[in-house]
Amino acid sequence: MRYQRLKGTTDILPDKIQQWDYLLSTVGEIYRTYAYQRIDVPIFEKTELFTRSIGDVTDIVQKEMYTFEDNGKRSLTLRPEGTASVVRAYLENNLHQQGGIEKLFYFGPMFRAERPQKGRYRQFHQFGSEAIGSTDRLLDAELIAMNMRLLHLLGFTDLQLAINTLGNIQCRERYNTELRKYFLKHDTILTNEEKDRAERNPLRLLDSKNPKLAEIIAQAPTSIDILDAESKEYWQELLSLLTELNISFTINHQLVRGLDYYTHMVFEIRTDALGAQNAVGGGGRYDHLIEELGGKPTPAVGAAFGIERLLLLKETYDINWHYDEPLRIFFSVWDSSVRREYLDLIEQLRSAGIIINTDYEKRSLKSQMKLADKFGAHYVLIAGEEEHIKGELLLRDMRAGEQIQMTPAALIKRFTGTMEAMNND
Ligand code: HAM
């Protein structure tokens, strides 16, 4: 084989597309009931948008971005996530001037040069939601409720919600200072890169997968100890709203997430069924990102989910997604020279939403039946020589194994409910 797909990328073949469509249409359906509207943003942006948003000293920016120089010598990056681009679009298109808050959702491919493994890819897909413009905790609680409802509706009934708070930006700074002191006390076991992180962004040392650090990470100070009154009040109100919404959660003070823009609430939705890649989604509040990217101070909250991970997870559950499958008819004609006499009939059936396929290679009737089978036809419509002479067609019900002869007008009536005039000349 001369060309193969790149490591960490996947081909989504037609037999999987139905699942994707179902998942994404359910996302749209549920998100719209919470008044979120869809937005589409570009797949690449100026690199600086991501370094500013996600943070210079993070795994994503330091190790995982697909960055390249274009012909104009600009540094561009394939988006590793969607939040930064949505915020950019919010500011650039003056969505804030519309008054009220903006609730936006999106989906599409994201790119991270991670080491590929089950559930972890270099091109993967997310759907995400961002609510921009309010500090109301109900927005945080609703965002979680919306996603839990979505996952439940999809059949994922036993996922765990882990939640934590980093406090407001002052608390987060104080927390960083505490962590810096703590990690630098243990600097003898830190690598040079880890020492650099301890100096510049100690919060991100908590994401480290280095087993040698596991113990000191487990004993590191937690943000809950340094919350001020405002942050405590925010946290308590959020937890009580979640309880009122009947959402079960586990408070996990080790959870800090790998991106720098969060303040107050961070959360992850996890599963035990996917091994190391246990987060199917996550998010949190980011009250300072809009300002950081040049806007007026504007609070916001959001989340994103990994589509491949959810589809992998589906395989471990006994879930059946019911698609509204349109009728499929295979049209089979004994002699391709008379095919054109039936074109109008076929088009009329298609305009009623029926999926119709036919033979394009002058195959024998027998091998056309095999094609019909592969196509998953509910019916085969056969224009055989004998029927042709009588001005009729044979309709074979593949599931019931029965067949009847019908005129084209009767066929149209049967499948479209109308007696539309036939134009078969
Ligand atoms: P994230 O936690 O980096 O958050 O990604 C969200 C989800 O995307 C993960 O929970 C996981 O399911 C999926 N994901 C991430 N990396 C990969 C990968 N390499 N392969 C497969 N799936 C992956 C964000 O991206 C934030 N933008 C979420 C957010 C929105 N926060 C506020 N608003």
Image (spheres, grey):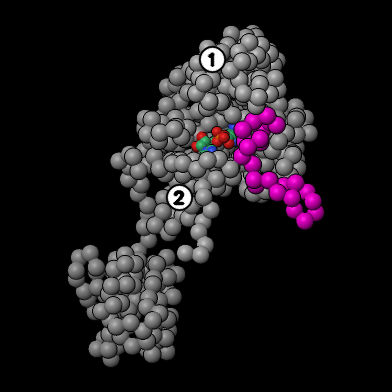
For the residue marked with disc 1, what is the amino acid?
Ile
Residue segment shown in magenta = 54-78
For the residue marked with disc 2, what is the amino acid?
Trp
Q: Position of residue 38 (x, y in %)?
A: 59, 45
Image quarter hosting the C terminus = bottom left
Which of the pair 80/364 is nearer the observer? 80
Residue drawn 46% across and 44% down? 308
Q: Position of residue 288 (x, y in %)?
A: 71, 26
**Residue bearing the label numbered 1:** 216
Residue drawn 31% across and 64% down? 376
Which quadrant of the view contains residue 226? top right
- Does label 2 point to a residue whose CB lies under 8 Å from ligand 1? no
Cα–Cα gap, marks 2 and 1: 41 Å
Q: Nearer the viewer, mark 2 or mark 1?
A: 1
Residue drawn 29% across and 68% down? 373
Compared across the picture, whether 90 is left or right of 186 comes to: right
Q: Position of residue 249 (x, y in %)?
A: 45, 21
